[in-house]
Image (cartoon, rainbow, N blue to C red):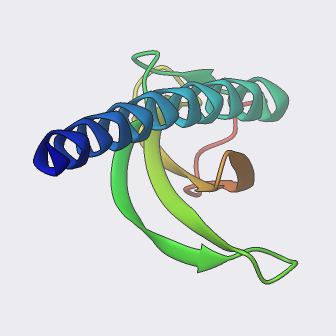
Amino acid sequence: MPEHWMLLLGLALAGWIFYDGMQVRERALRAGRDYCRNIGVQFLDDTVSRQRTGFARDATGTLRIRRMYSFEFTSDGERRYTGEIVMLGSRVAGVQAQLHRILH
């Protein structure tokens, strides 16, 4: 009987990790779109790609899951550039973009 509880607990934990990851990815996607709109470039492919996952401490010292996502954008319609979004827990810790060509 105890093995069944451990299995159920493991499945519940896996489900929570999956659900939480999807919500964080949606926040990262929104952050990438907003960032591109704010700097006047076009967000490409309407997606972000998780690059790394680990742990880091937030400003209060609490240990959080740190996820890094990449995205692509264009400033001139010809070249693709990359950007990066860092999520700490469910919050956006930072967004940055590769140096790119600016059209006047």
Instruction: Pinpoint residue 50: horizontal percent, then vertical percent.
Output: 36, 46
Answer with left or right where residue 97 lies relative to residue 71.
Answer: right
Q: Nearer the viewer, residue 70 or 65?
A: 65
Q: Residue at x 67, y 45 (%)?
A: 90
Q: Nearer the viewer, residue 89 or 67?
A: 89
Q: Residue at x 36, y 33 (%)?
A: 18
User: Where, quadrant-wise, is the N terminus in this rendering?
Assistant: top left
Where is 69 relative to 42, above or below? below
Q: Residue at x 43, y 23 (%)?
A: 47
Q: Residue at x 34, y 31 (%)?
A: 15
Location of residue 37 by image quarter = top right
Answer with left or right where residue 55 lies relative to residue 75.
Answer: left
Q: Nearer the viewer, residue 15 or 60?
A: 15
User: Where, quadrant-wise, is the C terminus in this rendering?
Assistant: top right
Most distant residue in the front direction: 1
Most distant residue in the top direction: 46
Q: Nearer the viewer, residue 58 or 45?
A: 58
Instruction: Pinpoint residue 89: horizontal percent, then vertical percent.
Output: 64, 54
